[in-house]
Image: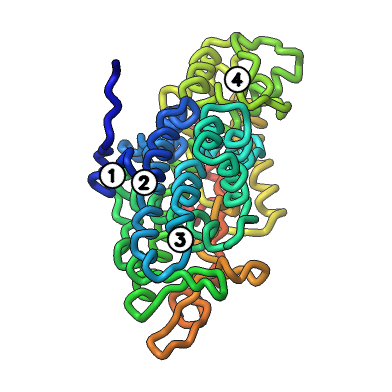
Amino acid sequence: MSRIAHKRTYLDPIHQDIVLDRDKPAERLVMDLIDTEEFQRMRRVHQLGVSYFTFQGAEGSRFTHSVGVMHIASQLIDMVSERTDGIEEQRPLILASALLHDIGHGPYSHVTEKILHYDHENWSCKIISGDTQVHEVLDKFDPKLAENIVKVLQKTYYPKYVSHIVSSQLDVDRFDYLLRDSYMTGTAYGLFALQRILRSLEIDQAEDRIVVVGEKGQTAVEDYLFARYSMYAQVYYHRKNLAARALLNQLVNRARQLMQDGGRGMAFIDAPTKKWLNGENLTVQEYLTLDDVQMTYHIKQWSKDPDPVLADLASRFLHRRLFKATKIPFHGQKQIDDLLQESRKIAAAMGYDPEYYVTVESTGFRPYDYYRPDSALPQTNIVVRTDTGEVNELSRLSLTVDALVKGNYESNWLVYPAEVSEKINLIKELAPAR
């Protein structure tokens, strides 16, 4: 007869010991959810997409991040429970929502989400609601729990602060990924005083919102927001990350084009991947077969494909022969289009298919803003109760945050093979960006 351990410890590089106790109902629920096939799948999805090409340590998974998010949520509940009526009753819902918020991520996380235009949050809700082990565990704990988690993730649950703990401008998800991504990339850009922020938070139940209390809390939150800005500027939008993302994008585009041509030259593709790349409807079980391992296997097979473009792009991705990325020193769309066409002519003259080997990558796409007050959803804004008792939105109190809110961070990058760099760099318009 097997013996079930009543306590389990996850040794985490960010939070140290994360201890779960089966004798505590909410933590027992978390342990059972972690052991499901759907949650274990997240070990096979990189947290930072293709950033491991740029930062050698960026090998962390959505699994470790999600456990960390759950842990911070538990810490937050502990700190506000004495001052917040009813939050202990919400603990199972909050911890399960925090744990499962990313369970719908596909291969390479946000990278393919942009390429294929799907929403991982919708898939999270489908997995939680579907015929899955996750749903079975939730239903056994409380028949209404799965439905309520979906409401939390979709921000329709009441009280609203439950959703805001998991997803808002100041949430446990962002707390974990900034610290974790900074650690895994070997940088210090994402560091901030997490415990100081947690100690400064209150749940304003009358207004159904989270409030930062005091000057020290405000300063810590300002540092957190600047850490977000720095991580985007220095890590998430590093030029090599953009080049790797563009290479994968072009590789997927070529595979999709070949499928539209009746599968001509495709060495290998399984049914779920074909449906996924074609934008067809997948069942939950089909979607759950998709992960980084499965996608990488396809790319390995495609590197031997009879189609020379697909084979070359796949080989470049596998062996880190990344494209180059040069920042475009102007923003006018006509200028950008003209530059792209001129660069594609150069690539074509050198024997490269211009449609797949030269492109423009923009940082205008952001999975999340650094910080952007939302007049339509004021409860999601960061608000501060000053030492005088006045409550204000943060950017009205802080010149630093106001500057972040008003800043324009969009940039465009010309992406092309290293083999054509010399000739493309001779284009007059790119001279300032060398």
Q: Disc 1 vs disc 3: Cβ atoms closer than 8 Å?
A: no
Where is residue 359 drawn, in percent x and y?
A: 61, 39
Q: Secondary structure at mark 3?
A: loop
Where is residue 236 drawn, in percent x and y?
A: 45, 48
Mark 3 is on which residue type? Ile
Mark 2 is on which residue type? Gly
| Residue at 62 percent of width and 36 percent of height | 129
Q: Disc 4 vs disc 2: Cβ atoms closer than 8 Å?
A: no
Disc 4 and disc 3: Cα gap in Å? 56 Å
Where is residue 28 drawn, in percent x and y?
A: 38, 39
Q: Label 1: which residue?
A: 18
Q: Disc 4 vs disc 1: Cβ atoms closer than 8 Å?
A: no
Disc 1 and disc 3: Cα gap in Å? 21 Å
Where is residue 1 drawn, in percent x and y?
A: 29, 15
Dot in front, 4 or 2:
2
Q: Disc 2 vs disc 1: Cβ atoms closer than 8 Å?
A: yes
Q: What colour scheme has been applied to the protein in the rendered image?
A: rainbow
Camera sees residue 135: yes
| Residue at 47 percent of width and 55 percent of height | 89
Dot in front, 1 or 3:
3
Q: Label 4: which residue?
A: 309
Q: Quadrant of residue 257?
A: top right
Mark 1 is on which residue type? Ile
Relative vertical location of residue 36 with respect to residue 415 in this rendering, above or below: above
Foreground residue among 71 and 239: 71
Q: Is residue 273 left or right of residue 21?
A: right
Dot in front, 4 or 3:
3
Q: Quadrant of residue 116?
A: top right
Q: Label 3: which residue?
A: 87
Disc 4 and disc 1: Cα gap in Å? 47 Å
